[in-house]
Amino acid sequence: MSLALTELFDSNRRWAADTQTRDPGFFTRLLNQQTPQLLWIGCADSRVPANEILGLLPGDVFVHRNVANVVVHSDLNALSVMQYAVDQLGVGHIIVVGHHGCGGVAAALHNRRVGIADNWLRHVQDVRGKHRDFIAALPDDEVRLRALCELNVLEQALNVCGTTVVQDAWARGHPVVVHGWVYGLHNGLLEDLQVTVQGPADVEPAYARAVGALQARHVPNAARAAAAAVSAAESA
Ligand code: ZN
């Protein structure tokens, strides 16, 4: 698709006019305040835009995006977004949103060199390493990629829980709930990976439950595929 940049201004003017027609005073109301209820930490992939997917308007969701939705404890960019969202805006939900078919996760899975991002994706390779045996036991690369995209969400949600921002918020009784979701490029739907954490005591149990459920979702497929291969061989 080739896109003339001047068309973007035309498109923007139409959008602003339509929004103002649909909801007179919309922009004036947003001038002095934003009151988003949630922080979305997602992938930079152009197919995974937070507001559109959630059907939300400007002002509704605070957003941080990077390659493969990674949360690193020393990343001042992500930490600053998180701290502002929680401490200044009072956001009550932090949601790590991965997506299936993630190019960054695929590059990490297959040791594919892409450039500077290799160093960033090293964090996703650490996720792969942590779950090495499980991933190796999966039947094919498609299933392995699906599993690693989901595991990466769980690990990054765990990292969110470990930040000083979230730990401090919990310590002073500020209710922050951390979630992990995954988005399907093929159907436009979000799925809750059930790693929902409301406080320090929840972190390990929620993570363990979510990993167990994830493995159960993928391993039966592997077991079924193996059983089908055996029965096909026997009937041949
Ligand atoms: Zn991605």
Image (cartoon, rainbow, N blue to C red):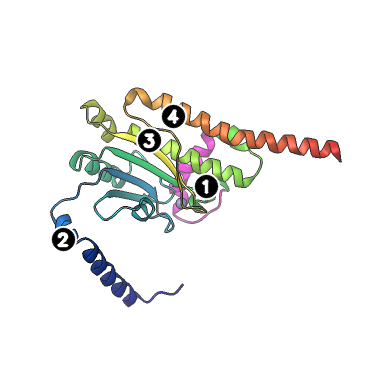
Question: For this rendering, which residue is in front, 118 or 138?
Answer: 138
In magenta segment, residue 28:
no
User: Which residues make up the magenta segment?
Assistant: 111-130
Foreground tag (3 vs 1): 3
Of circles 3 and 2, the one toward us is 2
The residue wearing badge 4 is: 207
Looking at the image, can residue 201 be seen?
yes
**Could you tell me how far apart the alpha carbons at marks 2 and 1 are, in whole angstroms?**
46 Å
Instruction: Locate residue 2, reporting x and y percent.
Output: 44, 75
> Do we see residue 137 in this rendering?
no
Mark with earlier residue (4, 1): 1
The answer to whether residue 82 is above or below residue 51 is above
| Image coordinates for residue 208, horizontal then vertical, percent | 47, 26
| Residue at 53%, 39% in the rendered image | 128
Relative vertical location of residue 117 with respect to residue 182 in this rendering, above or below: below
Q: Which residue is mark 1?
A: 108
Is tag 2's residue or tag 4's residue first in the polypeptide sequence? Answer: 2
Q: Amino acid at mark 1?
A: Ala
Q: Residues within 10 Å of mark 4 (few under 14, many from 20)?
A: many
**Circle 2 residue:** 25
Q: Which mark is residue 159?
A: 3
* Amino acid type, residue under disc 2 in the picture: Gly
Disc 4 secondary structure class? helix
Residue 32 as seen in the image, left or right of residue 141? left
- Which marked residue is nearer to the observer: mark 4 or mark 1? 4
